[in-house]
Structures are given as structure tokens and as C-alpha cells.
Image: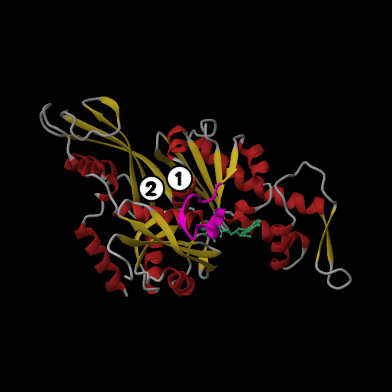
Amino acid sequence: MLMDNDKRFVTGIDVGTENVRAIIATVSKDGAVAIVGFNEGKSAGMRKGVPANLTGPASSIDQMLGEAERMGGYEVRSAYVSIGGSQILSTRTEGMIAVGTVEHEINLDDLDRVENVAVSGRIPANRDVLDVIPLEYALDGQGGIKDPIGMSGARLEMRANVISALTPNCENLKKATLAADVKSERLIPSVVAAAKAVLTDRQKENGVAVIDMGAATTSVAVYEEGDLQYVGVVPAGSNHITNDLAIVLAIDPEMAEEIKTRFVTGDFHSEKSPVIKIGREGKNERAFDRKEVDEVVKARLEEIFGEIRKKLMAARYDQRLPEGIILTGGGAKMRDIELFAKECLEASIKIGVPQNLGGVSESIEKPEFATAVGLALLAAEQESAAPASNKKSLKLKKPSEKQNFLQKIFSKF
Ligand SMILES: Nc1ncnc2c1ncn2[C@@H]1O[C@H](COP(=O)(O)OP(=O)(O)OP(=O)(O)O)[C@@H](O)[C@H]1O
Ligand SMILES: [Mg+2]
């Protein structure tokens, strides 16, 4: 559409509990990505990161997308879409197959077969596999192999990280997106997409975590040796802070949100004015005790980051992140939150913003846009793909499977 043949369009849609965001980008033949359209809007019908009904998310996607489409001069038909919710699981699996004689050279079919063995039956039945990340291969018992294509051996083993989500959540998200006339090409956990936008290859190689603090959920993704090692989601986010403030201070949520965004900081040590004043002097001015506000905020932050820390410990990554932790999502906009996170997680902390993108990118260099940008970048990578031996992530998507999937959702409509 409206585009010379050298470029194509890709779209990422981040469907959050509080906000929906879209990025439309062009990809040139050499893989260069330029953002041409973006927008954000309020979300509806989402609870704890997943759809609670179909019309809410469908109409919020539809409305929000309109502006991004006008800006980009492109009508979105398909997109990479974020999925949230605490039901997202990261499972370590293994598989082994016999490939023939020792002279046999490992090919793509072998990788497919060993992957099938590693995945099928290992994931509970009511789950959709979102991604399979091969962590390591072994040939005839010798491990540590990253890319076994062309190597010789009779027995192929694979260790993998399988990311899955509850099937009903995936189906409902696809339906809601489709009701907004957009086909979801792939569902990606929001924190994984955010990681794509804010991490460098070097960080992923050395060991790093991303924490996406949203409105109703906070998720963490860990990378090491270049691979996604772990994903976990905590069912609490920055809106819980707002709600706590509303309850404890007996004020409406709008006022609580104003206190949070204007006055709250993650620095609980330095001297601050003891009174928080909002509203207009003499008119509707209200004053709140800073200590009381701080106590409420700190308790909730401790709970959320404490849960994240437990997850990192359970996955044995709490003391193993040389590149530290990057915070994204709207919750990362709290002033000085990195000070609190540093103390709680005992790691170096940075705020992650999508950067170095061509096009209209300045306005989206914000932590809350990381997921949408990452989705567009992943979409850009997928199609511009890569020499055959590198097509790991493509092989799950055989045309026949895609066709079946489409028929399935259309028949339900
Ligand atoms: N300046 C700020 N200070 C503190 N919190 C903020 C600030 N700006 C936004 N937030 C909070 O960020 C949250 C929204 O973040 P975001 O848009 O990433 O959530 P979401 O993606 O809709 O939700 P989820 O990922 O949980 O489904 C809200 O709770 C909002 O109050
Ligand atoms: Mg989010």
C-alpha cells in the first residue's frame, strides 16, 4: 500500500489492562526499520492483563489504531500483539531423537523432530505454545552446541525453554483483535516484546533482566547467552498503588493517581516536604501526610518487587545478572523508582526506553512504549528473515497450520 516495492509495513499492538498502544513501522529491504505511525489510548474490558470481554478490547484497539493508521498512511490488517496475565509460563523441557548413523548431517527436519519431542506432552493441554527457545543441543552426548545444522551424529538432544499461555486467554485476545479487523500474526508476552526494544545483544549475552511494570501486572524476563531463559508474571502493578492510596487516604482514584504521578517517589530515604498539597489554594486544596503516603507506596512496591525477586530466585537468576535489570512499562515512570528497585533487588537498575529508531521516534522514547515498539521490531525481523539455517523461529509456522488456525477463528465468528 502506498509504498514502493522496497519497503513493507509491520505493526505491533500492545493490549494492556489500562492502555492500548500501536506502532506502525516500515522495513526496507536491508532490514532498516522506521516508525511511521503510533498512538495510545485507554483500554477497556481487560482484567489483570487478559480480556474480560471481547467488545471492550476490540473497540479500544479499533479507536486507537485509527490515528496511527492516518499518521502512517497505512491500513493495518495484521499485527504482532502483546499478551499479559499471570498465567504465562516458562517451562524447561528436553527431548531426544535418533537421527540415523554417525555420518548423518543434522538438518532442519531433525531440529523440527527433536523440538516436537521436547514440546509435545510436556505442556499442559489447555495451553498454547507461544514460543520455543532452543537453549542447547547435544550430539551423541556432547552438549553445549548452539547450532547443530551440518554437524554429524546419531543421537540429537535438545534443551529448550517453552513459553505458553492459557488457550482461552490466547483465543479471546485473537478474537478481540480480529473483531477490530486485525489478524494477530503472533502473540508475544509483553515483557518479551519490551526486551526486544530496550536490550542490546551484548546485554542479552552477558545476562540481564527486564521488568515491565504495567497497571495490573508486573512481568520479568531473563536473558543469558543471548537466549530468553525465563519469563514470569506477578498479578499486581502500578494501579494497585493508586488503589491503596485511594483506600487509605479515603479519596477518589483520580486524586490518588495525581498524588502518585506528581508527588510519589521511589526514594524513601532523602528529606522531603512533610506535606503533599494538591488542588488550588483556598478553593479545593487538600493536604496529605507525606509519611502516610510513603508508607502505603513502599508497602505495595515491596510486595510487587518482592514477588519478582522470589521468581528470580526460583529461576536461580537473582545473583547472576551482570548487566543488571532494566525497568519498562508505565509503572517505571514513577520518579526515582530505580532507587527503590536497586535496594530491593540488589542489582544495578536502569529505566529502559526504546531508542535509535528511525522515523517519528522521539515521541515514543518512553518506557511505556517499549512493548509496542518491540512487537513491531519482532514483526520486522520475522519476515525479513534470514538464511535458511537461521530460520529457527519460523519453522513452527507452517502454512497449513496458519490456514487451520485462521479457519478455526473465522468459523467461530
Ligand atoms: N508518572 C508516573 N508515575 C507513576 N506511575 C505512572 C506514571 N505514569 C503512568 N503510571 C502508571 O503506569 C500504569 C500504566 O502502565 P502501562 O500503560 O504500562 O500499563 P498496561 O500495559 O495498560 O497494564 P498491564 O501491562 O498491567 O496490562 C498505571 O498504573 C499508571 O498509573
Ligand atoms: Mg503492559
Question: Is residue 367 part of the magenta span, yes or no?
Answer: yes
Residue 14: percent from left, percent from top: 47, 61
Label 1 near ligand 1 (CB < 8 Å): no
Q: Given the image, on which type of amino acid does mark 1 rest?
A: Val
Question: Is residue 323 part of the magenta span, yes or no?
Answer: no
User: Badge 2 is on which residue?
Assistant: 163
- Residue drawn at point x = 72 percent, y = 68 percent: 252
Per the rendered image, the range of residues in magenta is 352-368
Q: In this view, does 394 lie to the left or right of 154?
A: right
Residue 215: percent from left, percent from top: 58, 58
Q: In this view, does 287 lie to the left or right of 375?
A: right
Q: Quadrant of residue 255?
A: bottom right
Q: Which of 234 and 200 is in front in this view?
A: 200
Q: In this view, does 202 lie to the left or right of 400?
A: right
Residue 235: percent from left, percent from top: 55, 53
Kindly indicate whether the residue at mark 1 contacts the one at mark 2 (C-beta within 8 angstroms): yes
Question: In this view of the protein, can residue 85 be seen by the observer?
Answer: no
Q: Given the image, on which type of amino acid does mark 2 rest?
A: Ile
The CA span between labels 2 and 1 is 8 Å
- Residue drawn at point x = 67 percent, y = 41 percent: 339
User: Badge 1 is on which residue?
Assistant: 231
Location of residue 121 with respect to 286 vertically, above or below: above
